[in-house]
Amino acid sequence: MKRLLLLVAVSCVVYIGTALAEHKPGHMEGHQHGAAVAASESMHADVKKHNACAHCGMDREKFSHSRMLVTYADGTSVGVCSIHCTAIELKASKGKPVKSLEVADLDSKKLIDAEKAFWVIGGDRKGVMTKTPKWAFAKKSSAEAFIKKSGGRPATYKEALALAEKD
């Protein structure tokens, strides 16, 4: 019986050794690497620089649909996960001149000018860091389609920010 177990164990070792020897270097790693490359290519430039929200620590890639980027006149920038954390940032940096405020378009996840965006307040899609959702769109038609599908009302950036300050 012991000889049979020994024979089975040796056979397994030989089989595994042969399989590993036939493994083409980089074959499996190529698949993993490809996935990593695809993920890094999908990562937005601002997320590479500011991966975590400066105020709550949330992953900005995971929340790329609601993220914002505050760029100050001195060239510094702060990445946040939502308009809620933008309100916190602006309050903490009161008096520091802001060069630009960008928000992700909910549909494309690309950053757009927050003040020119078409905002929607409310609706049945759960918001980020808030009880009352606030979403930004690059196109008015996209905001209107969202309202038709999910509810909410049109708003300006100033309205969305004022509500975020109260959250």
Image (tube, rainbow, N blue to C red):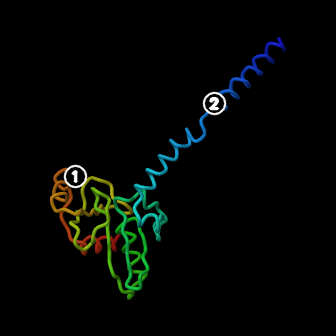
List the residue tagged with mark 2: 22
Q: Is residue 3 above or below residue 84?
A: above
- Describe the element under mark 2 as helix, strand or loop: helix
Q: Position of residue 89 (x, y in %)?
A: 41, 76
Q: Amino acid under label 2?
A: Glu
- The residue carrying mark 1 is 150
- Judged from this view, the residue extending furthest toward the bottom is 95
Q: Identify residue type, mark 1.
A: Ser
Residue drawn at x 36%, y 74% is: 87
* Tag in front: 1 or 2: 2
The numbered disc on residue 59 is none
- Would you place residue 99 above or below residue 153 in this image? below
Residue 43, image quadrant: bottom left
Question: Front-most of 153 and 7?
Answer: 7
Task: Check disc 1 and report its element: helix, strand or loop.
Answer: helix
Q: Whole-percent x and y of residue 32?
A: 52, 44
Q: Residue at x 49, y 65 (%)?
A: 57
Q: Nearer the viewer, residue 133 or 76?
A: 76
Neighbour tally class for label 1: few under 14, some 14-19, many 20 plus, Cα within 10 Å: few
Q: Position of residue 157 (x, y in %)?
A: 25, 72
N-terminal-most mark, 1 or 2: 2
Near mark 2 (Cα within 10 A), the count class, few <14, some 14-19 or many ≥20, is few
Q: In the drawing, does residue 15 fall left or right of residue 137?
A: right
- Please tell me in which quadrant of the rendered image residue 21 appears: top right
- Marks 1 and 2: CB-CB under 8 Å? no
Specify the quadrant that holds the N terminus.
Answer: top right
Give the spatial CA distance, label 1 vs label 2.
54 Å
Image quadrant holding the C terminus, namely bottom left
Report whether 32 appears left or right of 110.
right
How far across and down, in percent of the image, does residue 88 sit? 40, 75
